[in-house]
Image (cartoon, rainbow, N blue to C red):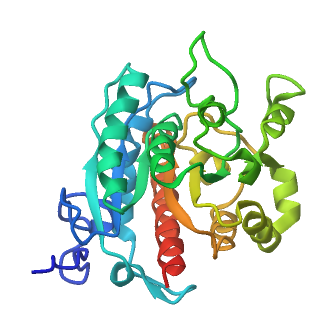
Amino acid sequence: MAPEHPRPLDARILPRFSGVRTFARLPHAGGLDGVDVAVVGLPFDTATTFRPGARFGPEAIRSASSLLRPYHPVWDVDVIEALAIVDRGDAPVSPGDTVGTYRQVEDELTQIVNAGVFPLCLGGDHSVTLAELRVLAGRHGPLAVLQFDSHTDTWDEYFGQKYFHGTTFLRAVEEGVIDASSSIQAGMRGTVYGPNDLQEARGLGFTVLPAEELRSLGPERFGDLARERVGERPVFVSFDVDFLDPAFAPGTGTPEIGGFSTAEALAFLRALRGVRLAGADVVEVAPAYDGPGQQTALAAANVAWELLALYAVSRR
């Protein structure tokens, strides 16, 4: 017998403030039979360099996601009916041990990816993305990355250590799990350590679009550029919530002013229609610094939903 298609609790019957907190009120399930998408929390923030707290990000995103509804009116798709989605819960992590946590996350995600299931991960700091990329590259080969961020995360080390949230994409290039020449880093802004910081990311092969250039480009031309760069490669979208201006998303570890609004973020994500998604994550939500309305968590939950809608449309 085929497994029942997973559906969320109906907010017209059971209020949104009731029930166990899962992403979009979807079923919590460990099994993967008949599943298209598994949402996985990665509650780890040992690799932050300033404000900790992203270990509570998955919990906050799940709570805010209770406001999500199944139908995406812009793309005319019922995400819930188009995709069999479950909340897999959180992967095991070991606070204080980044390398050990990578092993644990890789073990968890390997089961999901080898079952042909799309992983949507909720961070956690941006260091966890390296473990995701390792697993996906093991199945698909080197990936193209579309990174929405205020930092390139291509510095070499912090405090004499190689694995921090600011080193993720340099390590990914070194390990060969991504193809930088097919990848775009979008939204960079703020102070840096020296005049060569962005140029070093470009030297690795990335197309780097500082915030001013991305705004000038606009969503439509950004989408065209992304499709041109990634070609037929499988794509991983990584959305660091500090891509958003702290006026819209104060709850993050390394906020940078001059960022993007939530409306702009949705427009850039929707411009990616046509790319072949292999996986995605939303990272760096630190709810201790959020506003009383939890606007950062709400933004992150909706970004995650946009990524699911993008994946649903790509499967039509």
Towards the viewer: 202 or 249 = 202
Q: Could you tell me residue 35's position as x and y percent?
A: 28, 69
Towards the viewer: 253 or 229 = 229
Residue 86 sits in which quadrant? bottom left
Residue 14 sits in which quadrant? bottom left
Q: Could you tell me residue 161's position as x and y percent?
A: 56, 14
Q: Residue at x 79, y 28 (%)?
A: 192
Residue 195 sits in which quadrant? top right
Q: Is residue 131 above or below residue 272?
A: above
Q: Is residue 302 left or right of 249 when viewed as pictured?
A: left
Q: Residue at x 63, y 61 (%)?
A: 233
Q: Could you tell me residue 103's position as x and y percent?
A: 36, 31
Q: Could you tell me residue 42's position as x and y percent?
A: 37, 42
Extreme-bottom residue of the structure: 76
Towards the viewer: 48 or 287 = 48
Q: Is residue 2 above or below residue 108?
A: below
Q: Is residue 109 left or right of 176 when viewed as pictured?
A: left
Identify the image quadrant of the N terminus.
Answer: bottom left
Res 249 seen here: no
Q: Is residue 279 left or right of 232 when viewed as pictured?
A: left
Q: Residue at x 66, y 52 (%)?
A: 148
Res 278 seen here: yes
In this figure, what is the number of numbered marks? Answer: 0
Q: Is residue 130 above or below residue 207?
A: above
Q: Residue at x 34, y 24 (%)?
A: 95
Extreme-left residue of the structure: 1
